[in-house]
Image (spheres, rainbow, N blue to C red):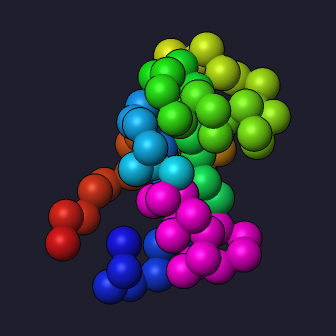
Amino acid sequence: MLSRPIANAVFIGGMEGIYEEYDLYKELHRADALPLPLGATGGASKDLAMKHEDRDLDRLDFARLFYERLNIDPNEPRVLA
């Protein structure tokens, strides 16, 4: 997370450490970078989703959520670096 700019971040479950990761992400990356806490996974990410007034707290279709919120096309070729 520290070596290069990140456009978006997905936060899943977690305990106290996820709050620190979230704060660090917001501090180090662009103001328009999109954090996406998944409320349905519970834990700290649910708290973050509620803070963002996320309407999809219990949504389990993560692939569609990524497509809609992060513009990740499921058919797009992946390049692993």
For the point 66% across and 21% down, which residue is it? 57
Q: Nearer the viewer, residue 70 or 52?
A: 52
- The percent position of residue 3, horizontal first and vertical second, equals 32, 85
Residue 76 in the image: state x and y as whole percent: 39, 51
Q: Is residue 62 visible?
A: no
Q: Is residue 40 above or below residue 27?
A: above
Quadrant of the image containing the N terminus:
bottom left
Is residue 20 in sight in this rendering?
Answer: yes
Question: Residue 46: horizontal and vertical position, in percent?
Answer: 59, 28
- Quadrant in which the C terminus is drawn: bottom left
Question: In the visual, does 81 lie left or right of 73?
Answer: left
**Residue displayed at 57% across by 40% down:** 37
Residue 80 image position (x, y, % from top left)? 19, 64
> Splitting the image into 4 quarters, where does residue 14 fall?
top left
Q: Name the residue furthest front.
A: 16
Q: Is residue 36 left or right of residue 50?
A: left
In this picture, which residue range is highlighted in magenta?
Answer: 20-33
- Is residue 7 in the magenta section? no
**In the rendered view, does 8 fall on the left or right side of 32?**
left
Classified by dominant secondary structure, the portion drawn in magenta counts as helix
Whether residue 49 is situated above or below residue 55 in the rendered picture: below
Tell me which residue sits at (72%, 75%) in the image: 31
Q: Residue furthest left?
A: 81
Position of 6 relative to 4 (above/below): above
